[in-house]
Amino acid sequence: MYFKGTDRAVFLDKREFTGPIYTQIKEAVDFVLRNIRLGATINGLVRKEKYKLPPEAIREILFLVCMRLSVAEMGLKSNTWIL
């Protein structure tokens, strides 16, 4: 979900993902990249765009969340928590 403001009362965009987990993660990364800030620097004639968060970090976070949820669904106990 993409929320308006900081109180999370109104969301601007919502998406649910289905299918194989690798497809869900890819679609979720694409969703996040569409909804975060994208800056750019210009050096001469070259423009270089840069996301506020690195796409690799977003992908890793989503992967870890999926793994954590899978462990929780199986009823296994883990000492690792994602906050």
Image (cartoon, rainbow, N blue to C red):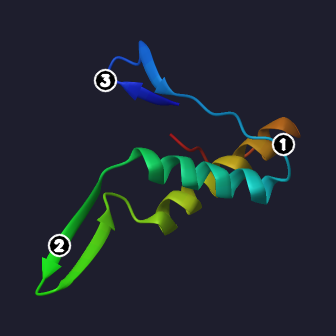
Q: CA distance from mark 2 to mark 3?
A: 28 Å
Residue visible at 50% across and 39% down in the picture: 83
Task: Tell me the number on the disc at residue 6.
Answer: 3
Q: Give the vertical position of 40 relative to 5 (above or below).
A: below
57 or 1: which is nearer to us?
A: 1
Cβ atoms at labels 2 and 3 below 8 Å apart: no
Q: Position of residue 53 (x, y in %)?
A: 37, 59
Q: Secondary structure at mark 1?
A: loop
Query: Looking at the image, can residue 79 be seen?
Result: no
Q: Amino acid at mark 2?
A: Thr
Identified at 31% across, 23% down, the residue is 6
Estimate the spatial distance between the alpha carbons at disc 3 and disc 1, rounded to whole Å.
Answer: 34 Å
Q: Going from the N terminus, do you reach mark 1 or mark 2 first? A: 2
Q: Is residue 70 left or right of residue 39?
A: right
Residue to which mark 1 is pinned: 76
For label 2, count other residues whose C-alpha is less than 10 Å away and answer few (under 14), some (14-19) or many (20+): few
Mark 1–mark 2 Cα distance, whole angstroms, equals: 47 Å
- Foreground label between 3 and 1: 3
Given this view, does label 2 or label 3 mark the residue nearer the observer? 2
77 displayed left or right of 10:
right
Residue sitting at 78 percent across and 38 percent down? 72
Q: Secondary structure at mark 3?
A: loop
Q: Are marks 3 and 1 in contact (CB under 8 Å)?
A: no
Give the amino acid type for the residue marked by disc 3 in the picture. Answer: Thr
Q: Residues within 10 Å of mark 1 (few under 14, many from 20)?
A: few
Q: Nearer the viewer, residue 76 or 56?
A: 56
Q: Is residue 44 above or below residue 55?
A: below
Q: Which residue is mark 2?
A: 41
Instruction: Provide residue 8's location: percent of width, then percent of height.
Output: 41, 19
21 shown above or below 51: above
Q: Earlier in the sequence, mark 2 or mark 3?
A: 3
Q: Amino acid at mark 1?
A: Leu
